[in-house]
Image (cartoon, rainbow, N blue to C red):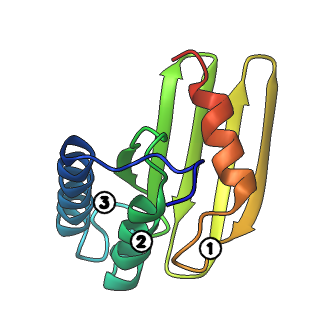
Amino acid sequence: MLALETPIGDDRLRSVAAAIDTIREVASECSEPGWNGEGAPAVDAATVSRAIAFVRALPGWAPLPEFCPEPDGSICLDWIPSRSRMLSVSVGRTDRLACAWLIGPTSGHAVSPFDGEVIPPEVLDRIRETMKDA
């Protein structure tokens, strides 16, 4: 193990398992086209797999996000420690992560690639920055 890695304990493993269950619940609730009453596509198996891969790839120091469906069939992963600090990462069926953030007076958005195994450093930096002192 690298010195910079945080060991993963039983509590973290249980939390990750609960997060995966939540992703599956979101997908189940949104498994039919039009789930939002406005014609949204279903959250499909590829999206669920990518969201689960993202959660599994999070380092031990990173808090787990909240999850919600998006009208384009993606799953949104949210870190919202306060009204002035938030990060949303949209995970869909492709290898692109769409991110939007508000950190104090600074806001922005970006798209980063996700290979299903390693979360891009810029996304991890945004999580760290968003959750700083939370």
Q: Is the C-beta separation of discs 2 and 1 under 8 Å? A: yes
Residue type at mark 3 is Gly
The amino acid sitting under disc 2 is Ala
The Cα–Cα distance between marks 3 and 2, rounded to whole angstroms, is: 29 Å
Q: What residue type is labelled 1?
A: Phe
| In this picture, residue 106 sits left or right of residue 19 | right
Tell me which numbered mark, 3 or 2, is placed earlier along the sequence. 3
* Residue in view at x 71 percent, y 25 percent: 103
Q: Where is residue 118 in the image (x, y as percent from the top left)?
A: 58, 70
For the residues labelled 3 and 2, say whether their Cβ atoms are less than 8 Å apart.
Answer: no
Real-space CA distance between mark 1 and mark 3, rounded to the nearest whole angstrom: 30 Å
Rendered image: mark on residue 114: 1
Q: How crowded is mark 1: few (under 14 residues within 10 Å), some or many (20 or more)?
A: some
Name the residue that disc number 2 marks.
53
| Residue drawn at 57 percent across, 57 percent down | 2
Q: Residue 48's x, y, as percent?
A: 34, 73
| 1 vs 3, front mark | 1
Q: Which of marks 2 and 1 is nearer the N terminus?
A: 2
In this rendering, position of residue 2 left or right of residue 41: right
Find numbered disc 3 in the image and state the secondary structure of the residue it sits on.
loop
- Mark number displayed over residue 87: none
The residue under label 3 is: 37
Q: Is mark 2 on a helix, strand or loop?
A: helix
Q: Left of 133 or right of it: where is 101?
A: right
Compare residues 129 and 51 and report the one nearer the observer.
129
| Residue 125 image position (x, y, % from top left) | 70, 43
As drawn, 66 above or below 74 = above
Seen at 21% across and 65% down, the residue is 24
What kind of element bears circle 1? loop
Horizontal relation, residue 69 to residue 125: left or right = left
- Circle nearer the N terminus (1, 3): 3
Along the line of sight, which residue is nearer the eye, 72 or 59?
59
